[in-house]
Amino acid sequence: MKLSWKWGGGALLAAAVAFAVVASQREGKATDGAARTTVPEAAGIYGIGTIEARVQSAIGFEVAGTVVELTADQGDRVVKGQVVARLADGEQRAVVAQAEAALAQARARLERARAVREQKQSVDSRRQALERKGTVSIEAAEDARAGADIAAADVAVAQADIEASRALLERERQKLAKFTLTAPFDGVVVKRDRELGAAVVAGVAVFTVVDPATVWVRAYVDEARAGRLAVGQTAQVVLRSLPGHDFPGRVARIDIEADRVSEERIVHVAFDAIPHPFHLGEQAEVVVGDGK
């Protein structure tokens, strides 16, 4: 009894399947061979990434010292050459003052040496003239010539001292300038790593500055769809903090080297208008082009 029920149920199922096939074939004929409608693939090329800046610089002092002045903070706009921080520079200023004094002394020695040279040359000229007349001995004339030569050598030494003192002063002034930190280009401060009173060593970053005009999205796109990417394509960017707002942009660069692990292509999308404020590292989604 149970066996015959199972066979009956199977027959009903087979009949239902056959009916569905026939109905679909008839429906296809009724549409006179028209193409079947399918759900289209998403038009744009999707990618996800983060906001970055192409021009970014972590700046710090070239010498060690204690921070005594900070004139910029996160979010501040700076211009190239603007002073943003200083180190205590009293000792170095004293060194510069000593170098300036040494240069002044060298100049004074040069003036004295020149005066002596002129006097010795005058004596030599007179002695040589008198020697030719026979009124002074040859030895006296030779002594006068030797004195003039020595005086000329002293002037040369004094001039060399001047050059050495100038070079030393220039080096110490350049070192003093390193106690002042300036902005390397027009930009925005996105990070301040040190505060007043902090002891810093040479090379440690105090600020991070970016050029806001170079802010873009560094996105990852599946290699399977990356073949349709091209520089200059239009794109839409959606920031995680502003999910309801699209920022138009364009593909600015496509990296030559793909990510071997994730099998994704890296594409950089530049904004038509930079979001304000922007936050480096914020997650962003991009849709590039129309997929054609």
Image: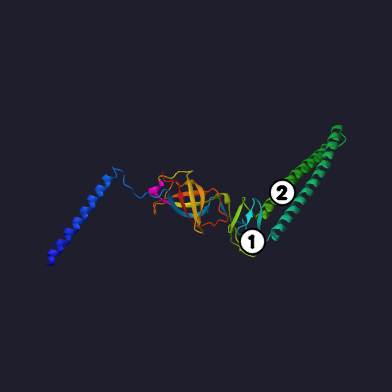
Residue bounds of the magenta highlight: 221-226
Q: Is residue 135 left or right of residue 110?
A: right
Q: Which residue is painted at 21% across and 55% down in the image?
A: 17
| Residue depicted at x 72% and y 50% | 165
- Its colouring scheme is rainbow
Q: Nearer the viewer, residue 88 or 245?
A: 245
Indicate whether 199 appears above or below 28.
Answer: below
Q: Main secondary structure of the magenta part?
A: helix
Q: Quadrant location of the C terminus?
A: top left
Q: Would residue 223 be found to the left or right of residue 122 on screen?
A: left
Name the N-terminal-most of marks 2 and 1: 1
Q: Whole-Å distance between the Cαs marked 2 and 1?
A: 26 Å
Secondary structure, mark 1, is strand
Query: Residue 163 location, x and y as percent?
Result: 71, 46
Circle 2 — which element? Answer: helix
- Residue 57: say if magenta: no
Amino acid type of disc 1?
Gly
Closest to the observer, 141 or 15:
15
The residue carrying mark 2 is 166
Residue 137 place in picture, x, y as percent: 84, 37
Residue at x-position 71% and y-position 57%: 93
Q: Amino acid at mark 2?
A: Arg
The quarter of the picture where residue 138 lies is top right
Left or right of 60? Residue 138 is: right
The numbered disc on residue 65 is 1
Q: Position of residue 279 (x, y in %)?
A: 54, 57
Mark 2 surroundings: few (<14), some (14-19) or many (≥20) residues within 10 A? some
**Looking at the image, which is closer to me, 82 or 36?**
36
Whether residue 65 is visible: yes
